[in-house]
Amino acid sequence: MLAELVAGALEDATERRSVRSLAAVEAAAEAKAPALDALALLAPADRVKIIAEVKRASPSRGDLADIADPAELAGLYAAGGASAISVLTEGRRFKGSLADLEAVRARVEVPVLRKDFIAEEYQVLEARAAGADLVLLIVAALDQPTLVRLHEFVLSLGMTPLVETHDAVEVSRAVDLGAGLIGVNARDLSTFELDSDLFGRLAERIPTGTVKIAESAVLNAADVAHYRAAGADVVLVGEALVTNGDPVATLKEFLSV
Ligand SMILES: O=P(O)(O)OC[C@@H](O)[C@@H](O)c1c[nH]c2ccccc12
């Protein structure tokens, strides 16, 4: 499944590239205001921080919410106290787009993450050109030389990579990179199984000073508290926020743990 998602994302990128050349995207990326310092804004604090996700659908959960106006939703997330906004830009299974990210960027002042299956430089440049401050890099989807190369490339554009892991070997690969932000996804992207204790088991392998992010499997405030108790600096929440009618109230409740 993960390989299929990456292959699809690369195919779609190749198609976009035939319309908008690498040089054109490079120029657009250079013309942008510099990326925000997401590493500083997500730094460990005496309260948990939340990355709130704009997510219409997923292969494991199907359709979640229509989200006709992603910028409006992101505005509510920011008003509710989210430290950053994640925007799913994958089109095939998550029903997102780069246009969603651009709209969100224009609305909020907090850092914006491009959440997609990134496997080549062109996609990273697109993220910067759309105004992203953070780019997701999924360790399971990339061999180590490619991961190293893309991690460097994201940094060279002034953005922050969020390096996503799912087991101990992947965490050590992320640590080897010198990643400043390491995420542990409770969902296995190959089988879609959820394991909300995975973060707790892997957290001790992430060095102090690294921002530790627990991703997925948060449905209520108790789940946020569970991740916080296990050492999460930041929790990334999608489904619970897009399916709940009042994201501001939900965020306030999650942030009060
Ligand atoms: O909707 P949830 O269970 O709160 O999960 C959000 C986020 O963690 C999830 O969307 C995600 C984590 N890693 C990913 C990689 C690709 C696509 C999606 C994801």
Image: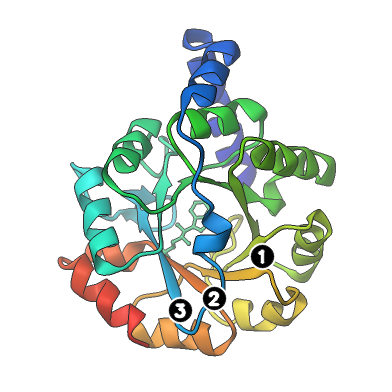
Residue labelled with disc 3? 48
Look at the picture and state if 206 lies above or below 116: below
| Measured Cα–Cα span from mark 1 to mark 2 | 17 Å
Q: Give the image location of residue 49, x and y in percent.
A: 44, 72
Residue labelled with disc 2? 233
Q: Amino acid at mark 1?
A: His
Q: Is residue 182 visible?
A: yes
Q: Are marks 3 and 2 in contact (CB under 8 Å)?
A: yes
Which residue: 35% across, 65% down? 82
Q: Is ligand 1 within 8 Å of the beta carbon of the residue shown at mark 2?
A: no
Q: Is ligand 1 within 8 Å of the beta carbon of the residue shown at mark 1?
A: no
In the rendered view, does 131 fall on the left or right side of 245? right
Q: Which mark is residue 151?
A: none
Nearer to the camera, 247 or 185: 247
Q: Identify the secondary structure beneath mark 2.
A: loop
Q: Amino acid at mark 3?
A: Val
| Measured Cα–Cα span from mark 3 to mark 1 | 21 Å
Which residue: 66% across, 65% down? 166
Residue labelled with disc 1? 166
Which residue: 79% across, 63% down? 175
Residue 152, quarter of picture: top right
